[in-house]
Amino acid sequence: MGSPKSLLAITVSSLIAAPALAAEFEVGGQVNRAVMFVEDGYAPDYLGVGSSTEFYHVDNRNSPTRVHIGGTQRLMEGWTGGALVEVGILSNPSNDVNPEEKSIDGDFDQRITDAFIDSPYGKITVGHGEGAAYNTGRLDYSGTGVISFRNPSLIGGGLSYALKDSSFKRKFDANGNFTGTETFDLQEGDNNRTSISGSIRDYNFEGRHDRIRYDSPRIGPVTLSASTGHGSDSDNYETITQFGMKSGLRVPGGRMLVGLGYSIATRKGETPDQRFDPDADPDVTTYGGSVSYFHSNTGFNITLAAVNYEAELTTDERTGTFSSTRSELGQFRYIKLGYRPSRHHAFDIHYGETRDRNKDDEKGSVVGAGYVWSPTEMFDIYAGAKIHSFERGEWCTSSGRTCYNPKYEDITIVTTGGRVKF
């Protein structure tokens, strides 16, 4: 991976007339393809109907296919300027496919379009890219991120849970008197449709967006970051402000990564009158982080993460027919135990859960294991298996006339694939 880009950098530098101002360029990317085997994962339009076993040929969204080009140039002693453009190539994304859409047309995704200046006083970056808190909850020494990534929904997120026959609803009359139970129409779902993406989320702050970002010089083992910017129309964020801290340090027996992040995002509102209405337009606050420890002598490692997502309900959300018991605080918790005896082999087992993603008293969880073989720096072969589960407690409509008790089948996913870097 290093030599072709290094050769290009040397070649371009040699063509520059003034060596003191030589520019270096880097071109690279990767292709990451995989096969998913799924048991009991259904499409939204036919829960529990059709084949319960499916195969998918996908682009692994844990680390998707991409290309990038970047350049740096020395401006003066201790000062460097540069730019980076990175584009994702989405063909059959692993988080979108389902039995109704096993083949999804390819598309391009703007990942990074950045310009920066790095100096002894810190680094300033302007453009589309990561906010200051981005990935502070995803630090990981395990080496298995390509198959066991922190966001479990990136593999299989478009698959929906099938409702069990044991699902039922309780009915009441206008006076609140219980009138009996009814079974669900399993195909219709009674407003209890849930996908893997809808059940579990790692709340990685607001993802990539247009912003200006500042990263401090290292202060001991710590780097501090701050950013402010805007989300896209699909994000529905007016402004996004983030703060982050990352640290890599030596500790007894090995080394440790620590990350903390905080962000506040203001939502746009559905109409111009709602744009600055705090009731119709409540802020979204995300905070948390991660820690990963690697034991040098044995290769064993452990990773922990905890991130919270707070969003007050709007007036419409509070008063909607199906908004009773809707959650204002989502909580993600994660633990991974890894073993990395050498740079060629990495193993892990992991467990993650998101509580109250949509409603109070619900939990989406995943338990899984992964293995990555890396014979060279340019090539990875991986395999992993995981089981997704979803639980939702009884919830009632705002009228109190109907209370739902849904039960869901687990979804099992086995994935194997390869990543080639260039």
Image (cartoon, grey):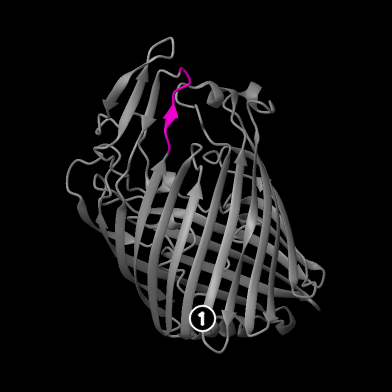
Residue 254 in sight: yes
Residue found 65% across the figure and 28% down from its top: 275
> Which quadrant would residue 147 be assigned to in this image?
bottom left
What amino acid type is highlighted by mark number 1? Phe
Residue 336 x/y as whole percent? 49, 68
Residue found 56% across the figure and 89% down from its top: 297
Residue 98 x/y as whole percent? 28, 48
Residue found 75% across the figure and 70% down from its top: 222
Q: Main secondary structure of the magenta part?
A: loop
Does residue 254 show up magenta in the picture? no
Question: Residue 209 versus residue 367: which sits nearer the camera?
Answer: 367
Q: Residues within 10 Å of mark 1 (few under 14, many from 20)?
A: many
Residue found 64% across the figure and 55% down from its top: 288
Q: Which residue is mark 1?
A: 300
Q: Residue furthest top?
A: 175
Mark 1: which secondary structure? strand
Question: Residue 37 versus residue 215: which sits nearer the camera?
Answer: 37
Q: Quadrant of the C terminus?
A: bottom left
User: Does 255 sit above or below residue 136?
Assistant: below
Task: Report the magenta residues as a range.
Answer: 393-399
Q: In the image, is 98 to the left or to the right of 226?
A: left
Question: Residue 170 versus residue 208: which sits nearer the camera?
Answer: 170
Q: In the image, is 255 to the left or to the right of 393?
A: right
Q: In the image, is 27 to the left or to the right of 264?
A: left
